[in-house]
Each structure stands twice: as C-alpha cells, then as structure tokens.
Amino acid sequence: MEIKCFGIAKDITNQSKIICADESISTVKDLRKWINSTYAEFNNLAQYMIAVNQEYGMEDQEIKAIDEIAIIPPVSGG
Amino acid sequence: MNYYFCDIRPDHLSIDEAYDFILDDSCGGMCLFIGTVRNVNKGEAVTHLDFETYKPMAIKELAKICVKAKSLFSLEKIAILHREGHVGIREKAVVIAVSSMHRDDAFRACRFAIDELKETVPIWKKEFLEDGSYWVGARP
C-alpha cells in the first residue's frame, strides 16, 4: 500500500510517499497504528487525518491496496 | 455555467478574475476577502511562505465549501483561488469572492468560506523566518 505524505509528514518520513507492506492492515485505524509505530514522531503531532481516495477517512473505514491513501497533517491554508 | 469556481495556482492570483466570475446582473452585494502574506508572526520577522497542497483533494474540498455555502446562504456565485509554492510578503495567498442579491449574505458566505478553508482544505503553510522554517500548526 502506498501512502502519500504532505507537509510535516513528508519531513518526518523524509519521503513524499511511503510503502506499507503489512497485509494485515484493513482499516484506517490499523494504518494509523502502523504509521505511529513505524515513525514515532507522528505521536508528537497535534493530530492528523488519513485520506482515502481524496476524501477524509473514518477510523473504521476499510482500506485496500488499490486505494489512494494520504496522511493529512493539521491543515494551515489561507 | 456553474455557480462556483475553485482553483489553486502557482503564480499571481487575480482579483479581477474572481470578481468577473461572481459578477451577476441580479446581485447588488459583492464581497471579496483577500488573505495576504504579512512580514511578522508572533513577534518574529517572516521572510516568505511556502504552500504545499494535495491538489486534487484540495480542489474537491474547496468545491464542497462552495456547495455548503450555497446551501446555507443566499448567494449567487462564489470563487475561491489559493496559491501554492513560494509566496512573498504582500502577495495574495487566497482570494474569495461572493455575490449575493444583498450584502448580508455575501459577507456571511465569504466569512464562512475562509473559516472552513482553514479547517478542512489540505493545504499546508511553511513559514520562513530569518533563522529557520516550520510547518504552521503541525505541533501542539
């Protein structure tokens, strides 16, 4: 599963996209756990959302490897 | 023609472009909000900003704001333009324009749109100071 990284997420992972090969991940919540354990620095963020196919994902939402997944750190446009 | 127009641009934002889009024969109230880059934040000198966007999702979220604004207020047209990349002091980071029959809904819809944008649209501001840079709002 490919995960796009923006803003501070890109700084933390040092990449604009990361690969998660853990096939047991089936929900947004699972992925959040994987992200937080793989990159501990995410635990220090204000919070972050996970987008699925360019929409904000719910924690219990199912995700698949073909989905477009992105880490959305606290937004600060305007 | 659609009643809303949203875009993210790497270069200069045109107030005229937004204004020309919202102008409507039936409307007497036009409200424009322009967010510009200032040279100071929390007492520190700011040299410039850099906006990163998740562009396809950001455009979708901007469109959702327009649809929501239309459902809440009596507006005719709405345009939202946002910059991406390097934006210097005094430059426009965002332009929001709303037309309505009367001024009250134009003011309220414009205020709603900028407040929502700051909460929901995947755009990130990196602030550059004389001695470093940081992502705004990323850490508690």
Image: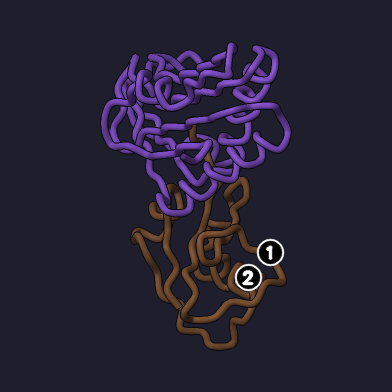
- Disc 1 target residue: A58
Above-or-below relation of A17 to B53: below
Question: Measured from the top left, where is residue B52 in percent x and y?
Answer: 38, 43
Closer to the camera in the image, A49 or B103: B103
Above-or-below relation of B48 to A53: above
Q: Which chain is purple?
A: B
Q: Furthest residue to the bottom?
A: A23
Question: Measured from the top left, where is residue B86 in percent x and y?
Answer: 28, 32
Q: Chain of mark 1?
A: A
Q: Residues within 10 Å of mark 1 (few under 14, many from 20)?
A: some
- Element class at badge 1: loop
- State the colouring used for the structure image: by chain
Residue B28, quarter of picture: top right
Closer to the camera in the image, B115 or B73: B73
Question: Measured from the top left, where is residue B70 in percent x and y?
Answer: 65, 35
Between circles 1 and 2, the one closer to the viewer is 1
* Residue that appears at 60% across and 56% down: A49
Closer to the camera in the image, B19 or A68: B19
Q: Chain of mark 2?
A: A
Closer to the camera in the image, A65 or B104: B104
- Element class at badge 2: helix
Q: For chain A, what colour was chosen?
A: brown
Residue A36, quarter of picture: bottom right
Asked if disc 1 and disc 2 are in contact, CB closer than 8 Å, the reply is yes
Which quarter of the rendering shows the C terminus of chain B? top right
Give me the disc on residue B135.
none
Above-or-below relation of A68 to B67: below
Q: Earlier in the sequence, mark 1 or mark 2?
A: 2
Give me the disc on residue A28.
2
Say which amino acid is labelled 1.
Answer: Met
